[in-house]
Amino acid sequence: MKTKMKTLLLLCVSTLVVLSAAAEQKLKNCNEVRAAFTSKGLNVNDVPNKGINGAPLKVCPQGFSCCTVELEEKLSQQSQTEIKAPVSRLSTNLQSSFKQRHDNFDKFFRELLKNAEDSLNNMFVRTYGMMYVQNAALFRDFFKSLTQYYVSGSAAVNLDSMLSDFWDDLLERMFRLVNVQYDFSDAYMECVSQHTEQLQPFGDVPRKLRIQLTRAFVAARTFVRGLSLMPDVINKVSTVSASPSCVRATMKMLYCPYCSGQVALKPCQNYCLNVMRGCLANQADLDAEWNNFLGAMLSLAERLEGPFNFESVMDPIDVKISEAIMNMQENSMQVSQKVFQGCGTPKLKPISRSARSVKETVFTGRFRPYSPEARPTTAAGTSLDRLVRTRGAKHHIKSLVLVCCCLTSSFCAAQTGEVKKKLKHAKKFWSTLPETVCAGERIAPGDECWNGTAKSRYESLVMGNGLANQVSNPDVEVDITKPDTVIRSQIAILKEMTSWLKAAHSGNDISFDIDVEGSGGEESGSGSDTTSQTDDMYFPTTPNTRLSKVRTEQKSPGGAGAVLKGSMALVLCGLGLALLAPHWR
């Protein structure tokens, strides 16, 4: 029995001696380390041929080592680059994704504005002929102001004032056309324009359109601004320099196993987590405000799909303005009588024309076409006279507009649906960076891993995320009293943008350049409207509620061909108008 025990003990000692000799020989021979460092782009001449005394080393364990103090310095620089690489890659992917979404949405909204202007111009040239051509500048300025408002908000254009001026100017021009036999002074027309809202010559179109435009434009431009902010925040936060203590900890985690001759040994997962949470402590503090911002973006995206749909407002805007003009035509006699009662009876123009010319200028209840030989028509081939006479025509127009909006909404729905997925995926991006980095081939599972000093189990507790939780980090020295100024400034920017997004969600406009601008605040919620009176003159009015609201809440999933479908929808709408035209006769 004793002989067997002695034999076993001798075998164990022999094995240990052999293993120790092999390890020592391996350490004395740094060929594997030299090869590994060469593959990482380091100069092979910086690595000793055999193990040396590691007592002077400042980071890695002392003893026999394949690293020198000078090599430690170079490894620190290398480790800083290596640890930034996965963070930079993840951030760049996220940054690029939202940059593309921003460009898509911005281009789409601008094209909608341009298409709406072109559509109105084409429709009005055919419908109103020379009367429109002579007054086209009014509508060009209207769309120019809308574009300025989309780009710069209320800092550049007060939407309420712009819309009021538009309808006042349109009323003045139409009022002169339907009362060509009278001579109106500037003071008289000023009296008329001061009471446009009380007269309601255009029915309820101006009020409804103002509410719809304000909500849609505020939502669209704020959403696009939010998308443009994200790449900038990601870029600034992801490029924050690592602290010296982070660089040392990273170098110890990644390269000290090489110095001890264990080139294949990877860090323990919990060890990696503590190092990365210490290095990315400031970035993790961005997470709370980042998530709030993303939540506000998602809520506003829901608005863009529903009641604040930019597309459903812009696509039929030519028909809405045309209907307002038709309202004025139908009510022109009543409007004129109310104006004459309130502002006084104007003087007749001097009788200096032939009977024929007087006969042609007398108001007949609707605008005459500019050329008797070529009566103007809409894209549907329908003249204005026929539209005015056929009461069912408005219903057909509204129905077709609704169909067209549903057809063209596929692109917007596809884009909004896609960006919502990206926004949800981006939540907790900063706080989960350590877990994302410390995964896969970068770490070793179980206990066969590098714990910072040897190949063994990592015993320390894993710290939480954020600066405050790093006070007891065993692997990275973090000064929790000195938060990073760049990241703190980005937190403040996100917080401010979130407040703008929430305001836009309620239909309120907050300028990006000044604190608050009151263009659109009264439309939030119910969209209620009030009538202001500038003097004691009273115009008896009857609210016109004939205009039914054109809304599109159709949500259809889009795919790769969504852009093509959106363009084809315009062609389909034109064909639809042409096909329906014979039935309106």
Image (cartoon, grey):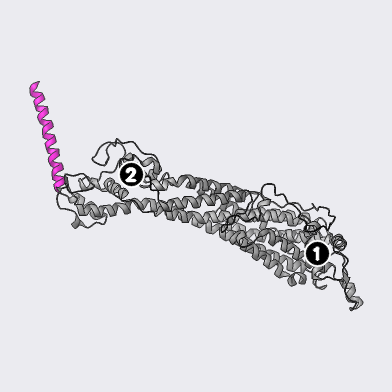
Please state if 192 lies on the left or on the right of 250 as rendered.
Answer: right
Determine the image quadrant of residue 561: bottom right
Q: Magenta segment, which residues?
A: 1-29
Q: Is the stretch drawn in magenta largely helix, strand or loop?
A: helix
Question: Does residue 558 appear anywhere in the picture?
Answer: no
In the displayed structure, 508 sits above or below 385; it is: above
Residue located beneath label 2 in the image: 275
| Among the 4 quarters of the image, the one containing residue 572 | bottom right
Residue 345 is labelled as: none
Q: Amino acid at mark 2?
A: Val
Q: Is residue 452 left or right of residue 427?
A: left
Question: What is the secondary structure assignment of the residue under circle 2?
Answer: helix
What residue is rendered at 84% in x and 67% in y? 178
Quadrant location of the N terminus in the rendered image: top left
Q: Which residue is mark 1?
A: 191
Across and down, in percent, residue 61 comes to: 21, 44
